[in-house]
Amino acid sequence: MSAPRVTIALLAIIFLLVAASFQDLTVAADGGGEPVPDSVCDAKCQKRCSLKVAGRCMGLCKMCCHDCKGCVPSGPYASKDECPCYRDKLSPKTLRPKCP
């Protein structure tokens, strides 16, 4: 093979790998798959709620964690952009963010 063909083939492979990784993220954020064990949400929510009033924060966080298949921002000050499902959940009455 000539150099341009090798370059095009490598770029095509890289593109396919990147596209496949985004598809996996989309499926995970969509909520497909197995239910998340309580222990996973407990640990993640304890970290997320470590600087807040534990009772209310933990209850809401666990509910959001289960709905979002285990995706919870990594700490008390972590951006909700880490988990789009967690970020986009709204309270039906007030239309404010539901997840702490």
Image: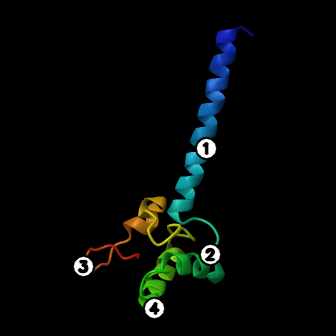
Residue 55's disc number: 4
Q: Residue at x 36, y 76 (%)?
A: 98
Q: Amino acid at mark 4?
A: Gly
- Marks 4/3: CA distance? 21 Å
The disc, 1 or 4, on the residue closer to the chain's N-terminal end is: 1
At numbered mark 4, what does the secondary structure look like: helix, strand or loop? helix
Image side of residue 9 versus residue 96, left or right: right
In this view, the mark in front (4 or 3): 4
Upstream in sequence: badge 2 or badge 3: 2
Q: Quadrant of residue 90?
A: bottom left
> Is mark 2 in CB contact (under 8 Å) with mark 1?
no
Kind of element beneath mark 3: loop
C-alpha gap between disc 3 and disc 1: 37 Å
Badge 1 density bin: few <14, some 14–19, many ≥20, Cα 10 Å: few
Residue 45 at x, y percent in the picture: 53, 78
Q: Residue furthest left?
A: 94
Foreground mark, 3 or 1, reads: 3
Which residue is found at the position 55% from the left and 81% from the top? 46
Tell me the distance, in whole angstroms, between the alpha carbons under discs 2 and 4: 21 Å
Which mark is on residue 94?
3
First in sequence: mark 3 vs mark 1: 1
